[in-house]
Image: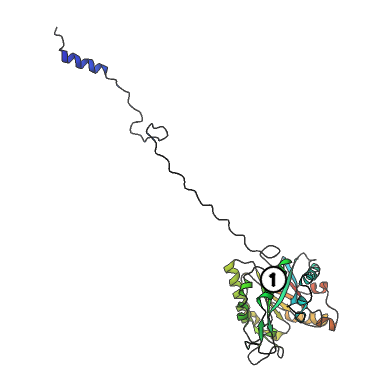
């Protein structure tokens, strides 16, 4: 038998030394980076997220909330920086605020929370032309600021009373926009002092229209909407049917609380008769107010008591003393 050659023998020996590795069962599968022996890539640092800013809380009324009625009843004094303007201007302003609080407590027996009001005469009608020829003047900024600071000490509302003379209501109202952007400032319009060219305030009884009142209410509503304010009060005073014509043109406006303040002077029976005449068939979006006069009423008879005022129907939502 022939022996294998040396070269053949060497090849056979080398083949016997080759180690055969078993097949990798994961061959061809995606590599798990957590178990792979290959060097892992360095993870990029996580970006720091800026926290969302905390939204500013919505402005509220002085004693909380954003709605005036039906929770509250407004009780206040009207006047200005002198005693001749009314009760609000007599003596120490903080003493007047304490007097309002005492009166307001007598109007809370039906469960409504009293909200004190300072009705400041901010535009004053005059029997002379004044510098503008419009028979009215605006109170200085420092006067408005003083009364606003005072009413805030007592968590009440400031209503800016407008006696426009020969000016238009809307023009005088817009002059006070700086204050109307505050959540605790509203309006009180006094048509008795709104006269036409050739007329003089105090010599004739002024008047306005529902359309003019509506333009002011629309403007006030736009401020509430744009600046996310709580409800604003817009009072309009009336003591005679001729003071306001076409009242039906005063429409509801979001964020504006419309109040007709009935201002008849006299003994209780006369005041109630005026009330019944002017509050008759009032539009459902208009609330009622009632005004009492410490001097003019008392000269004719006794001042109506809070119980007598609350006996009126519809029941007043605003009670004002002058």
Where residue 224 appears, as percent x and y from the top left, is: 60, 69
Q: How many marks?
A: 1
Q: Nearer the viewer, residue 25 or 219?
A: 219
- Which residue is farthest bottom? 198
User: 144 or 103, which is in the foreground?
Assistant: 144
Point out residue 220 in the picture as x, y percentages from the top left corner: 61, 73
Q: Which residue lies under the disc numbered 1?
A: 148
Q: Quadrant of residue 120?
A: bottom right
Q: Is residue 269 left or right of residue 149?
A: right
Q: Quadrant of the C terminus?
A: bottom right
- The answer to whether any part of residue 284 appears in the image is no
Residue 34: which quarter of the image? top left
* In the image: residue 310, left or right of residue 169: right
Q: Quadrant where the N terminus lies?
A: top left
Secondary structure category for the residue under label 1: helix
Q: Which colour assignment does the render follow?
A: rainbow
Decide if residue 119 is in sight here: yes
Relative to 69, residue 41 above or below: above
Q: Nearer the viewer, residue 4 or 289?
A: 4
Q: Residue at x 16, y 13 (%)?
A: 6
Residue 122 in the image: state x and y as whole percent: 68, 78
Q: Is 145 situated left or right of 304 in this image?
A: left
Most foreground residue, 190 or 136: 136
| Percent of width and height locating residue 152 | 71, 67
Q: Is residue 127 above or below residue 294?
A: below
Crowding at mark 1 (Cα within 10 Å: few <14, some 14-19, many 20+):
many
Q: Report the residue that reaches farthest toward the left.
A: 2
Q: Quadrant of residue 284?
A: bottom right
């Amino acid at each position: 038998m022939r022996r294998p050659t040396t070269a053949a023998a060497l090849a056979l020996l080398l083949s016997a030394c080759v180690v055969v590795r078993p097949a990798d069962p994961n061959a061809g599968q995606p590599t798990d980076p957590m178990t792979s022996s290959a060097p892992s890539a360095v993870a990029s640092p996580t970006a720091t997220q800026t926290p969302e800013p905390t939204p500013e809380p919505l402005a509220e009324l002085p004693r909380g909330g954003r709605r005036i009625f039906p929770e509250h009843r407004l009780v206040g004094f009207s006047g200005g920086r002198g005693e001749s303007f009314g009760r609000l201007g007599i003596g120490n302003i903080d003493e007047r605020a304490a007097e309002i609080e005492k009166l307001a407590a007598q109007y809370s027996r039906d469960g409504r929370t009293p909200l004190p009001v300072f009705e400041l005469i901010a535009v004053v009608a005059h029997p002379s032309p004044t510098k503008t020829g419009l028979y009215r003047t605006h109170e200085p900024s420092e006067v408005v600021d003083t009364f606003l600071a005072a009413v805030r000490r007592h968590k009440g509302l400031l209503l800016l009373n407008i006696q426009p003379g020969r000016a238009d209501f809307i023009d005088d109202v817009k002059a006070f926009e700086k204050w109307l952007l505050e959540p605790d400032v509203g309006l009180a319009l006094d048509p008795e002092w709104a006269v036409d060219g050739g007329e003089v305030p105090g010599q004739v009884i002024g008047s306005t229209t529902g359309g003019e009142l509506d333009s002011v209410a629309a403007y006030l509503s736009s401020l509430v909407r744009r600046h996310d304010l709580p409800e604003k009060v817009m009072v309009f005073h009336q003591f005679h049917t001729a003071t306001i014509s076409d009242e039906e043109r005063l429409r509801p406006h979001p964020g504006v609380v419309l109040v007709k303040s009935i201002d008849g002077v006299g003994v209780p029976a006369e005041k109630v008769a005026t009330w019944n005449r002017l509050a008759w068939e009032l539009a459902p979006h208009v609330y009622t107010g009632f005004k009492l006069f410490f001097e003019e009423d008392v000269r004719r008879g006794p001042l109506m008591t809070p119980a007598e005022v609350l006996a009126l129907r519809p029941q007043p939502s605003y009670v004002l003393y002058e």
